[in-house]
Amino acid sequence: MALTLQDIKPVSLCIATEELFDSKRFRENFCDNLVLKGKDREIEELISPFKRELIDRDPKKFLEGYKAVIISNIDKILSLVSARYSGIDLKKVEDIVKNGRELIKKVLFASSFEEIGTLEQTFKSKVSLPTYSLFISAMRSSGIRVV
């Protein structure tokens, strides 16, 4: 049996969401990878003011949208974990869902990017790593060799 993109979706969402919890790095490195390093003047003129506002001026404007993305990702993770892994370890799934819901509340009521950043370890230990563990178990029970 082959591993598909759909199989890795819960884990990939965890990885992407974990990156978002590092809100300081997100804001400081916004578009620094290729867009701003590429020295494309046209796009740089569009992105640079946006980045300055994100970092310096009024980050509150961006905070609500940022929180919405994290909450949406966690909701998707919880849904996928419940649907796919309940037969493997129902207790672990219930714990992930419970912890994920608590984390959603904390993100929802966070008042700053820094406060969101403090939740990274909680997400990693209570949602991401247990999801990865269930994924590995599911792959092994399907006969897919994983490292």
Image (cartoon, rainbow, N blue to C red):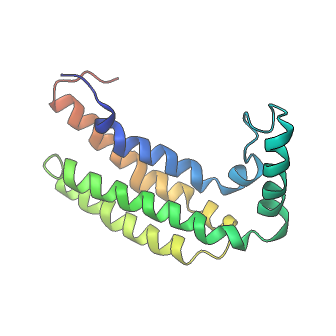
Query: Relative to 134, is 108 above or below?
Result: below
Task: Name the side, left or right, on which 82 lies relative to 75.
Answer: left
Please identify the residue farthest to the left as the structure is shown: 87
Please identify the residue farthest to the front as the structure is shown: 42
Q: Residue at x 59, y 67 (%)?
A: 65
| Residue 119, horizontal then vertical, whole percent | 56, 62
Q: Residue at x 79, y 55 (%)?
A: 51
Image quarter where the N terminus lies is: top left
Quadrant of residue 113 within the rendered picture: bottom right
Quadrant of residue 74 within the rendered picture: bottom left
Task: Name the side, left or right, on which 106 lies relative to 52.
Answer: left
Looking at this view, is 101 or 125 the one in front? 101
Image quarter where the C terminus lies is: top left
Q: Residue at x 51, y 60 (%)?
A: 70
Total marks drawn?
0
Quadrant of residue 140 within the rendered picture: top left
Task: Name the side, left or right, on which 89 lies relative to 121.
Answer: left
| Residue 94, horizontal then vertical, whole percent | 24, 62
| Residue 39, horizontal then vertical, whole percent | 85, 33
Q: Residue at x 30, y 24 (%)?
A: 146
Looking at this view, is 133 or 76 the one in front? 76
Query: Relative to 116, is 60 above or below?
Result: below
